Image (tube, rainbow, N blue to C red):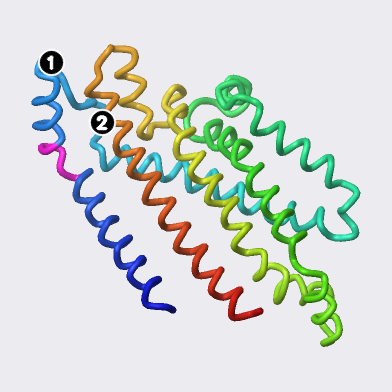
Amino acid sequence: MPKAQMRRWLLLAILVVAFTVLISRMELWEATLRFLFPQESRVLHPRASLLVLVGEHIRLVAISSGLSILCGIPLGIWVTRPGGRNFLPIVTDLTSFGQTFPPVAVLALAVPMLGFGLLPTVFALFLYGLLPIVRNTIAGLSAVPADVLEAAAGMGMGRARRLLRVEIPLAATVILAGVRISVIINIGTAMIGAVIGAGGLGSPIIAGLVQDNLAYIIEGALPAALLAVLADQLLANIERVFAYSAETLT
């Protein structure tokens, strides 16, 4: 691994530790918010500590994004194969519909079937996160040069081996860019889960909007923004690792 990449991983580790310390120091948050909003009787959301809220938020995003990855990448691979190519327009339309349909509307439809809390929120985020993963998987695999595939076939590789050893490594950076977009979208969209009791960083934001308490809103919005930045940098570092591997492959 190049030294520049090692430095990026070290910097990310330091930032993660700093973020963990920051959200653990509730007395610091209370003092800062009390200084900024002296007129508010309460400046910290009473439901749970920031550490708990961030943990709930990460759980929502991790489960929904994991399901989107597990479904989106195989789906994108399938429609680029001869047996699934005829279904490409249908898959594209369905995944596009999943993101254009408002998550709040998905929640409203899912709650009667799945109840309140985690399940309907994960379902809504799963649908919302599919489109960039499927589209980037298709785009990445379609962009693999034909001469590279011909050379792999000339070396005696079958279709499955070409996919695993050549196509996916070369398309990995594009696929990971889709995963990166999907995860960042879900970090922001997961806020709506608080409306139906899923918890997360949306809880103080929703409470702040209802009670006209700006301190609550900042308590939820600032850690969510920092979490999105850290997740983006983590996935960017992983993307660079795969880009370096693809360079060595070619």
Please tell me which residue is depicted at 60% across the width and 24% down the height of the picture. Answer: 102
Q: What type is the residue that disc 1 sits on?
A: Ser
Q: What type is the residue that disc 2 sits on?
A: Glu
Quarter of the image holding residue 54? top left
The total of numbered circles placed on residues is: 2
Counting other residues with Cα less than 10 Å from the Cα at mark 2, is it few (<14), some (14-19), or many (20 or more)?
many
For label 2, the SS is: helix
Please tell me which residue is depicted at 54% across the width and 46% down the height of the picture. Answer: 181
Please tell me which residue is depicted at 72% across the width and 69% down the height of the picture. Answer: 167
Residue 66, image x, y percentages: 55, 51
Residue 110, image x, y percentages: 61, 26
Residue 75, image x, y percentages: 74, 52
Please state if 83 lies on the left or on the right of 49 as rendered.
right
Residue 163, image x, y percentages: 75, 70
Please state if 26 lies on the left or on the right of 163 as rendered.
left
Instruction: Find the distance from the CA under tag 2 to the CA under tag 1.
Output: 15 Å
Please state if 196 lies on the left or on the right of 49 as rendered.
right
Q: Which residue is mark 1?
A: 41
Q: Quadrant of the N terminus?
A: bottom left
Quarter of the image holding residue 169? bottom right
Q: Which residue is mark 2?
A: 219
N-term mark: 2 or 1: 1
Please tell me which residue is depicted at 36% across the width and 66% down the height of the picture. Answer: 9
For label 1, the SS is: loop
56 shown above or below 8? above
Magenta span dominant secondary structure? helix
Residue 223 shown in magenta: no
Q: Quadrant of the C terminus?
A: bottom right
Magenta residues span 24-28
64 shown above or below 207? below
